[in-house]
Amino acid sequence: MADHNWTGCVKSLKGVILDMCGVLYDSGEGGGVPISGSIEAVKRLKESDLQLRFCTNETQATREKFVAKLQRMGFELSISEVFPPAPAVVSILKERGLRPHLLVHDDVIPEFDSVDKTNPNCVVIGDAADKFSYKNLNDAFQVLIGLEKPVLFSMGKGRYYKETDGLKLDVGVYMKALEYACDVEAEVVGKPSAMFFQSVLNDMGVQPHEALMIGDDLVNDVGGAQQCGMKGLQVRTGKYRPRFQSVYNYCEWHDQIELRRVISLLLSRWFP
Amino acid sequence: MADHNWTGCVKSLKGVILDMCGVLYDSGEGGGVPISGSIEAVKRLKESDLQLRFCTNETQATREKFVAKLQRMGFELSISEVFPPAPAVVSILKERGLRPHLLVHDDVIPEFDSVDKTNPNCVVIGDAADKFSYKNLNDAFQVLIGLEKPVLFSMGKGRYYKETDGLKLDVGVYMKALEYACDVEAEVVGKPSAMFFQSVLNDMGVQPHEALMIGDDLVNDVGGAQQCGMKGLQVRTGKYRPRFQSVYNYCEWHDQIELRRVISLLLSRWFP
């Protein structure tokens, strides 16, 4: 971590955006488990003068149920602080008069209750996990290929995430599959979309250079934030794997640690 | 069909390679149905002085069972004339001492009986259809991501094919999915690989410019053949869809017709 970057960032810092899965907790059977020290880290951030928001590509539950799960784990956070892709997609669908065919997790379907889904003219995919069967992917493909101008929304474009029993394929993998099948480019809603990060910055009322994004994904968290003008920092928890350090060398802060240590460092320098 | 192309090709033509699904038959429940006129077209080709081979990316059955199915439909062809990807992959695996994790259709597994599959150090995917579940794709992903240098073989890279009840996703879609998940490039065995076409040309003992490939797929049949120095011709059966004409305009022969008419034209000029 080069001192000039760190010092400059800390001086102007007004807001922190935290990725959730892999930073706060590891997902898995029974909802997952908190990562050691992260509950305390969130608490310390909340007690500081920094603005705090949570930005996730989680699409396996409604925002309400997802936040309730995190609260049960012990995290202090409220629904209005959490930004997942589904509500953002719903806004876009309504704006553009689109009727989606959904290939999403059963538990996130209620987010789309207010949207007309008859005679679909687009496809929305999320992290559907076991629902990514051949039949279901084929059904989504047949809707797309039958449209004169296929429109595909992907809630995130992650490659994989870590559950307690290992790495699992994420929605981006199926986005690439459908993009190839139909020769289309998906519209990504969620990280690393600049529009998605900007909506969180707007909510905090801070400029990009005044904000720090902390996540475990170099492309979707760190890279996305940097392309948006924010600082990005990767933690060594979640899906972090040392072999990718050499592949993705665009992250400015190379010290990759767990959230607890990041926040300790951050706050100790913030309040010297 | 510009006369100068047609005449030049017909004059030097010594061999014809036929794609199978979408040219000879449409696949589907019960094995599929012959395309009208194609049984007679194959018969006429066999009675001519032209060499004839069949080149398929079919990976849902052993070569023996696949040929038996075509024979039951009424086609005159023998196992030695049919070139699918699985035997070619088996040769490569043995040459390079690779032990595959297989994500393939159950019915093609016997092709791999002679290959050591313990402690896999590569992944082979074929058109696994309903076996492309989230769990099975995740299992293949976990093998790949666990290798220091992931090696992925894909038996073809087709986007989709036509069954009697509609278009179905092909292996290429899942190849793209795993490529993205693991940041690797698959080695494609089957069409449009030049090595694969060359092995068929070698078997016929003809040069590329003396051979014509007839298929329903502009990328894998026509494009692959042309990149190999052969002529390529697309029929209007199988997965042919008019909207793709404007997208792929690199095929030299633009008259796109069914096999019966292609062969009629070919033989009437060949034997004027």
Image: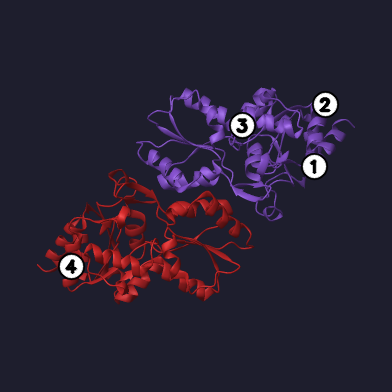
Chain colours: A red, B purple
Q: How crowded is mark 1: few (under 14 residues within 10 Å), some or many (20 or more)?
A: some
Spatial distance from mark 2 to mark 3, Cα to Cα? Answer: 24 Å
Residue B46 shown left or right of residue A4 in the figure: right
Depth check, mark 1 against mark 2: the one in front is 1
The residue under label 2 is which amino acid type? Glu
Of the pair B162 and B184, the residue shown nearer to us = B162
Spatial distance from mark 1 to mark 3, Cα to Cα? Answer: 23 Å
Secondary structure category for the residue under label 1 = loop
Residue that mark 4 sits on: A43
Regarding residue B133, the answer to whether it shows in the image is yes
Provide residue B166's location: percent of width, then percent of height.
66, 51
Earlier in the chain: of badge 1 and badge 2, it is 1
Residue that mark 2 sits on: B47
Q: In this view, does B102 lie above or below A180?
A: above
Residue B258 shown left or right of residue B186 in the figure: right
Quadrant position of residue A34: bottom left
- Asked if both marks, 4 and 1, belong to the same chain, the answer given is no
- Give the position of the N terminus of chain A as an image quadrant: bottom left
Of the pair B271 and A4, the residue shown nearer to us = B271
Q: In this view, does B168 lie above or below A267?
A: above
Residue that mark 1 sits on: B36
Spatial distance from mark 4 to mark 3, Cα to Cα? Answer: 61 Å
